[in-house]
Amino acid sequence: MAFSLREALTKNYQRWIAKNNPPRDQITLNRKNIFIVPTRNGLLFIFTSGLVFIAAINYAVSLAFALAFLMVSIFILSILHSFNNLNQLTLSSSSTQDVFCAEEACFRVQLSRSPKRRHESLELNFPNSSASPTMNSTTSYTDLAARDTEEVGVFTLATKRGEFKAPRLRVLTRFPLGLCRAWSVVDLNLHCLVYPRPVPFSMNQFDSGASGGSDTAISREGSEDFYGLRDYVPGDSLRQVAWKSVARGQGMQLKQFVDYVDNKIWLDWDMFYGFNVEERLSRLCYCVIQLSKTGNVYGMRIPGGEYPPATGPDHRKKLLRALARFGAE
């Protein structure tokens, strides 16, 4: 029963936040979107001040009354300072790099302030976001006192391939005494693209057609293109003798011809027959990463798209983005 009530309250809260804080690329915090509640220490502080006040009434001690009123005044001032620490703070979305599935996505958020204000002990995170095993926390800490602007990276785990929209961002502070917690939840319309998770496997099938160098073709003996001259060996065909060289007194030499064999590699969807969609995408992703390191010219064919062979960082990014968006409407 208690769990159902809590779940219902959470849903209503999320619905209210979504209605009153629509997505936008920049937002300035004010009294309409800043919330304040006492922390555990704050509740203990209030309880202690109440005990002091009751003791002052029972024993009629003037100093006890003064202490109780002082504690209440400190708590009220803590509320005001906590609010002002977030008030007029401007948050803007910044560019975000693409990541692979199961990696930490770093969303860049730019904080800015007016010259007359200072914002200290700020915490930024995505509520209920999960962290990778290599990170203990997804909360980022910063201050906005010495500089007018500050760019902060806020992390969350990318668990699904495709377009990833970040959850609502929470900005929180317990400044100055830790008695009150002031926070705001905003939607900065943060997005990034999540590539398939690469799955390593043996790529021996590509070795025969890859030179691994800067050449884009390999050659074999043939009859199409002139390659050069070599010394005559008894038994060679006289039709390939370079008679002009013989006439110039350079001896018997043979003309060599070669056929150039294209070493461009094609990655094809049907190369991984028997695997499901995500498994195929993961293996194609691994192929793209490995081939981009060798300098080979490679292309890709997947249902709904064909990408001609090329090389370079832009080509690599184009193919990875195509794999990330595969099947998206």
Image (tube, helix red, strand yellow):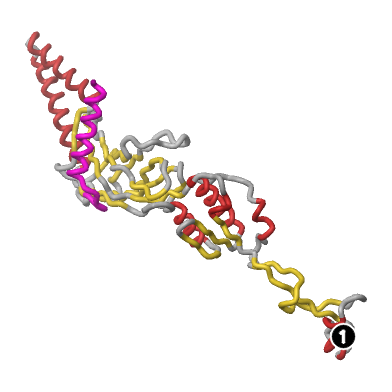
**Membership of 119 in magenta stretch:** no
Residue at the bottom extreme? 247
Q: Which residue is mark 1?
A: 250
Q: Is residue 150 shown to the viewer in this render?
A: no
Residue 302 percent location from the top left of the image: 50, 56
| 189 vs 209, nearest the viewer | 209
Observer-nearest of 303 and 222? 303
Instruction: Give x and y (percent) for residue 144.
Output: 28, 45
* Residue plotted at (48% across, 47% down): 277
Question: In this rendering, is residue 35 above or below 253?
Answer: above
* Residue 205 placement (x, y as % from top left): 66, 53
The residue depicted at 26 percent of the width and 36 percent of the height is 173
Quadrant housing residue 245? bottom right
Residue 67 falls left or right of residue 275: left
Q: Amino acid at mark 1?
A: Gln
**Residue drawn at 46 percent across, 41 percent down:** 102
Residue 127 visible: yes
Residue furthest to the top in view is: 59
What percent of the width, then of the height, locates residue 124?
A: 31, 40
Q: Which quadrant is the N terminus positioned in?
A: top left
Tell me where residue 230 sits by quadrant: bottom right
Pick the front one: 300 or 165: 300
Asked if residue 314 is positioned above or below residue 67 in the image, the reply reads below
Q: Does residue 67 appear left or right of residue 269 in this picture?
A: left
Residue span colored magenta: 1-27
User: Is 38 left or right of 278, judged from the image as shown?
Assistant: left
Q: Residue furthest front?
A: 274
Which residue is pictured at 11% across the width and 16% down the height? 53
